Each structure stands twice: as structure tokens, then as C-alpha cells.
Amino acid sequence: MTLGMDTNNLEQMDNKSPRTYRFWIPALIISAYIGLVFWARASEHMMGAGLVFLGNILGVFLLWIWWTFLSGLRGWGKWVSLLSAVFVVGFLSTSIRYAGSSDGSGMPRFVWKWSPTPDQRLLGALPQPNAANVPEAPLRYLAADSPEYYGPNRNGVFNNLSIQVGALGDSLEELWHQPIGMGWSSFAVVGRIAVTQEQRGGEEWVTAYALESGSRLWHYAKTRRFSEAMGGDGPRATPSIHNNTVYALGATGILDALNLTNGAPQWSFNVLASGDPNLMWGKSASPLFLEPENTVIVTGGAAQGPTVQALHADTGEVVWSWGNEASSYASPIEATIQGERQLVVVNENTVVGLSPDAGKPLWVFDWPVGMMQPSAKVGQPTVIDGSKVLITASYGIGAVLFKLTRDNSGKLTPSQLWHSKNRLKTKFSTACVRGNYAYGLDEGIFACLNLTNGKRLWKDGRYGFGQNLLVDDTLLIQAENGDIALVAADPKAFRELARFPAIDGKTWNVPTLAGEYLLVRNDREAACYRLPVVANPTK
């Protein structure tokens, strides 16, 4: 009896004893999280965003552990905390779904399960029939063809045009703005027609729009769908237009040749027909048309090759093929190096120069992917002064400038000038070169590099993982949130000259400049703006 009374007394004393909160525990957790955020922002580590996301989850969990078990919580308070955690976890697990990455950092995006999917949003838009024919009325503003990915030279540089930034307030005009299917394809423009690729339900479309009105002129649909959880669904590559023919490569590896005027199919070719598996994030390299050879250059898949193939532009028959290396996401370019016309192609572990007529390797530069397997090289190779090549990538690969010289036998030999793993990490975009300086998005922040030594001159302006073009002395930046910014191409300092909202939502597509017509799009909407652009005939 005495023992029982003593036990009751002890329980009463315990319930009345002062609560020990141990505030040092949450202070330590919060300090560690703040330190992680500052480290991720300062270091720009490629895993920074993912670690911050995991830090969010771990931090909340540790704070709950402290509150429930280590803060002196007693009785019903502890039960309420436990039941609340069960309710929150149960509610979220049944009410939200994963909707891909929220941005180029790979940060996951979650939405309510009852939120409409991209397919449902598109079906909810008013149906748009194809127009009867291509409009014949003259365009109202200065127009210039842009038939290739990243502009006429595939390097994002437009030296023959100039943006009159001071007139932007008076001249900026939205010509059209409308829904579009999923995908990361951009527009190719010839005359009055703008062509892109998009995903509409289970069909992959090649679609032609009227440049000035946005009316749909024709579409070519096939039952194909590439799906990837992080990058999203739909086609990635931008069509190429030449000799009234559209060459469009879908994300599953099917290349279609279509009539530009009416979309009539001419031939199709599967670039993965050899059994080569597709790349993790889908075929993204835009086909390259070669005028003298009348061929279309395409790249292969993720394993045994062929790495590069040349197809007859009129029939789709293979003219030549080269390589057994995995491809990259970059598009092949045509360039003249040391006086010799050639193809320059970025692969998973190399950059190669090939003869356009036969695919003979002229030189090979080793550029291993490092820790990222498989390859995630997206940026275009840029040829400088006819002898040097700038290549850039993220994921621990970095930027490299190498030079090509001829030996005594006349063979081209590459030699590295400099390499930096921590500068000009362009991820989805390409650096633009003006003079001795390269400008580009370095893990979402705009930067300028001195090409002589690879040293960074400045880094400023957080635009996310968007895209950029160089129009004479003005950089046109497509921010990841859909804004358009104009920045001075000035190696001395970062100067944003103007900015306006163009479209809404995650935007990885490259903007297309066709004279005064600026076309932008993402995986849900597209728009065309008139910019105050004038021609530079002397450049």
C-alpha cells in the first residue's frame, strides 16, 4: 500500500515537473537547413536543388520528432501530434501526384490529383480547325527566314539584325497568344509559315501556323508518344525547313519529311531502326540539311550507333553512316574549320569533325561525360575564328575551348586551350559568342567569359534554365518563367535593358527570331510578338 502511494505520488510529481523543451535541437535543425540553402545557392552544385528538397522533408520530419518525443510533450498532446502526422501523410499521399520537375534544377513538382493534366487543359481549349490555305497577303513587318534550330547558323547569333531597345515601349506588340500541345520543340520559319512539333493526346503532331495570325494551316499526326517523368512528354527537336520540305524528328526517333505548303508526307525514317535504344530524355537533335549534298544529317541513340547518318533528302535512303558511340542531345552543325567545310557533332564522349560527302572522320576530340551517365550534353558547339571550338555542358562536365591545327601531313589535330568545370554550365542552352567573349546561362544565372583564358568576367541576373540568343550587340534571353529579357552584350558589366512577360510557365524552348517576329512557346502556350528590329545589311 505504501509502495502504491509512492508510485502515484511519483506520477503526479512527473506530470507537474517543468517541461524540458530542448530548444537547442530545433535551433540546430533550422541552422543546418539554412546553411544547406546558402551552400546550394553559393556553390551552384548540380545536386544543390535536390539536396535542398530532401532537406525540406528531413527538416520537417526531424522537427516533428523533436516536438513529439523530445520537447517534453505529454499526455493528449503527444497523441494529437501522432494522429495529426498520420492524417497529413495519409491526406497528401491520396491527394497529390507527381507532375514532373518544377524547373531545370530537377526540383520535383506536385499538384492536386484533381488538377487537369496538360492533355485535359488542351482539350478544354476551343478546337481550332486547319485554315483553308496559306495566307498570301504581304506580312506587315520586317521578316527574315529562320529555318533552323537556334537560328540560320545554329549558334543563336543574328548579326544581320539589330534590336532597337529604346523603341521597345512603343513598338512591342502581341500578335497572337494561344494554347499549344506539349513538347520542347521550337519554331522554324520560312516566309509566312512557322512550323513546330507538339503532343496532342496520343498523337505527335508536326504543325504549321500562320506567322502573323497564329492560325493553324495544317498538321501531320501520327500515333506516337514519348513520356519521361522528369522532362515531360512530347517532341523535343525543332524542325528544319529547306526546298519547301519540312524535316521533323520526333522524340521516339521517327524522322518525317513533309511538304511545307500542305503537310503531305514524302517519306519517313526511323533513326533507331538498328535497335539502338533511345536516349533517356528522348531524341532532341534537330536534323541538319546540307545543300550541296542534298542530304539530311541525323544522330543516333544511346548505345551502339550508328552515331551519325546522312539520308538522301528526296527519298530518305541512307547515303552514309558513321560511328558506334552513343549520341548526345546537341544538334549537328555545318562549319568551315581551317578552310575545310565539315560537320561538327557532339557525341556522348567525343566531339567529331566529319566530311559532309562521305562521313569520313577528320578529327576527334575526347570529351568524356564524367560523373553523369548517360550523357546530358545539350549545348551547341560554336566554331570561333575558323579554328577554335567552344563546347559547354552542366553535370560536372563544364566548358572547353579547343583549337584545330594541321600537322605536316595536312591532318587536323585538336588541342585543348582551357577547361573549366565550374564556369559556363549551360545545361539546356548554348553560349553565344561575340568577339572574344562568350555569354550564356551558367546554372540559371547569366554570365560572361573571356575566351582567351576561360575566366569569368561577371555573373548576374537569375533567369533560370531558359535560353538565349545574340542579336548584334543585344542578348535576348528567354527566362525559364516565360519572360523575355534584353541584356547588353558588354564584357564590362551585366546590364538588363528591358524585360516583359511573354508566356507563362516553365519554358525550355528556344525562342525564334524571324525579322521583327519573335515566336516563343513552352509545353502549354505559344505567342508571337513584334519587336523593333532593323536589318544590318553590312553584317
Image: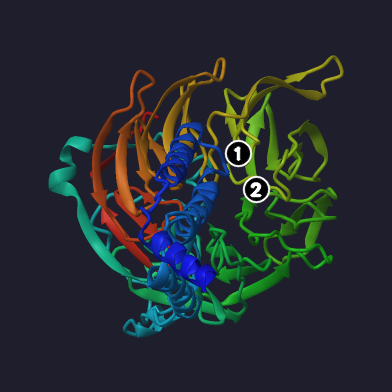
Q: Amino acid at mark 1?
A: Ala
The local crowd at label 2, few if under 14, some if 14 to 19, many if 20 or more residues have their Cα within 10 Å, is many
Rendered location of residue 220, percent (x, y): 53, 77
Q: Residue furthest left?
A: 170
Which numbered circle lies on residue 153?
none
Quadrant where the C terminus sits is: top left
- Disc on the earlier residue, 2 or 1: 2
The local crowd at label 1, few if under 14, some if 14 to 19, many if 20 or more residues have their Cα within 10 Å, is many
In the rendered view, does 438 fall on the left or right side of 178? right
Rendered location of residue 93, percent (x, y): 50, 76
Q: Amino acid at mark 2?
A: Ala
**Residue at horizontal 72%, vertical 41%?**
371
Could you tell me if residue 242 is visible in this image? Answer: no
**Residue at horizontal 40%, vertical 84%?**
123
Quick one: SS at disc 1?
loop
Q: How far apart are the two marked residues, 2 and 1, measured between alpha carbons?
A: 8 Å
- Give the labeled residue for mark 2: 376
Which sits in the foreground, 539 or 424?
424
- Give the labeled residue for mark 1: 393
Image quadrant in which you'd find residue 285: bottom right
Rendered location of residue 121, percent (x, y): 38, 79
**Residue at horizontal 62%, vertical 77%?**
224
Rendered location of residue 518, percent (x, y): 33, 52
According to the image, what is the colour scheme of the structure? rainbow
61, above or below 393, in the image: below
**Residue at horizontal 29%, vertical 55%?**
502
Image quadrant in which you'd find residue 279: bottom right
Which sits in the foreground, 490 or 528?
490
Which sits in the foreground, 498 or 79?
79
Quick one: SS at disc 2?
loop
274, above or below 28, in the image: below
